[in-house]
Image (cartoon, rainbow, N blue to C red):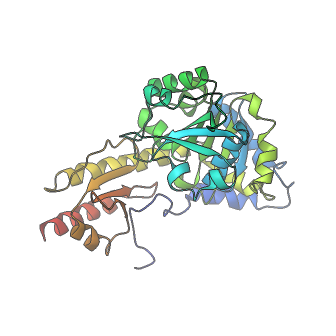
Amino acid sequence: MSQTWRGFASDNYAGIHPEVLAAMVAANEGHDVAYGDDRETARLRDLVRHHFGESAEVFPVFNGTGANVVALQSMCRSWEAVICTDTAHIHVDEGGAPEKVAGLKLWLAPTSDGLLTVDELDAQIYRMGDVHRAQPAALSVTQSSELGTAYSVEHLGALVRRAHEHGLWVHLDGARIANAAASLGVPLRAITTDVGVDAVSFGGTKNGAMGAEAVVVLNPELTQSVPFVRKSDMQLASKMRFISAQLAALLSDDLWLRNASHANHMAQRLASGVREIPGVDVLRRVDANAVFAILPADVTARLQERFRFYTWDEATGEVRWMCSWDTTPEDVDAFVAAIAEEMSA
């Protein structure tokens, strides 16, 4: 493939947004204090409080797995467990990091669409006080989900309330929180602070950053433990200003929203295009920037020689296509035309 190839495998494949890159260059001037006592991190704190509320505290980290592990480990003691869906990133795609690094048991709730219901949460609350079962202490929800679906504000609020009634902390894995907020047409705090979430893994890398994530603590009871857990989990950056500068750029001038809205719109364009192709089945809702479709195996194999994308389920032939902040209408239309060509071959 040439250096200018385009793909639909992951929003991590996209480059750095120019405004983020410019912010990093600006942060590179002169010296500044290490480990988060710098000007960029101070500015990021102000921006996070603007978007999430005055009590919010932000702790930048290197990657999304680190953010999830730090947040969950801060919520749970060694004998406790986390409830999540069976498709959750912390279960499927983090190499066992929550178990290996944080020592946490994950209790898995099967879902059809990646979104947990109150009844499905209730079904995980049993044998409380029994020493033979790892005790649920936290709920982790993903917004938007790994299946491209987004919790409505009402759905998320009901789930958080029930989790708190059960005495659980609530963690929101927000690797694509910008895409969820853009899809719902709400500010970031509407699906975090306002519904009672305790801590958020705020994603920047998939939305135009080079490599920047953060734990955003919304419940002050967690503020004291997170800094120490972050250090012991090897997620404390010495030159933190360069991570903070990226996140600050995304949270300034609605860049987070512009990038996410564009990616979502490209996913809608892609879904609309492939639905017109006989034999292509799009069975899942397209709420954010992911499109899931079922293709014949031979068509998938030929297409993957021309475009990068992942097979989601080998058994059913379901594939996943991701759109990014830099996906263009021309990219989408060329891909749709290629799918139509291969389906008719």
Residue 169 in picture, x, y percent from top left = 64, 31
- Quadrant (top left, top right, bottom left, bottom right) of the N terminus: bottom left
Res 318 quadrant in image: bottom left
105 sits left or right of 344 in the view: right
**Above or below, comparing residue 138 to residue 283 in the picture:** above
Which residue: 63% across, 50% down?
A: 98
Q: Is residue 187 visible?
A: yes
Residue 203 in picture, x, y percent from top left = 58, 48
Residue 276 in picture, x, y percent from top left = 16, 52
- Quadrant (top left, top right, bottom left, bottom right) of the C terminus: bottom left
Res 51 quadrant in image: top right
Which residue: 44% across, 26% down?
A: 119
Q: Is residue 257 visible?
A: no
Residue 174 in picture, x, y percent from top left = 55, 43
**In front of the other: 296 or 91:** 91
Which residue: 49% across, 26% down?
A: 122
**Above or below, comparing residue 167 to residue 43 in the picture:** above
**In front of the other: 18 or 113:** 113
**In front of the other: 262 or 207:** 207
Q: Residue furthest bottom?
A: 2
Q: Report the number of discs.
A: 0
Res 305 quadrant in image: bottom left
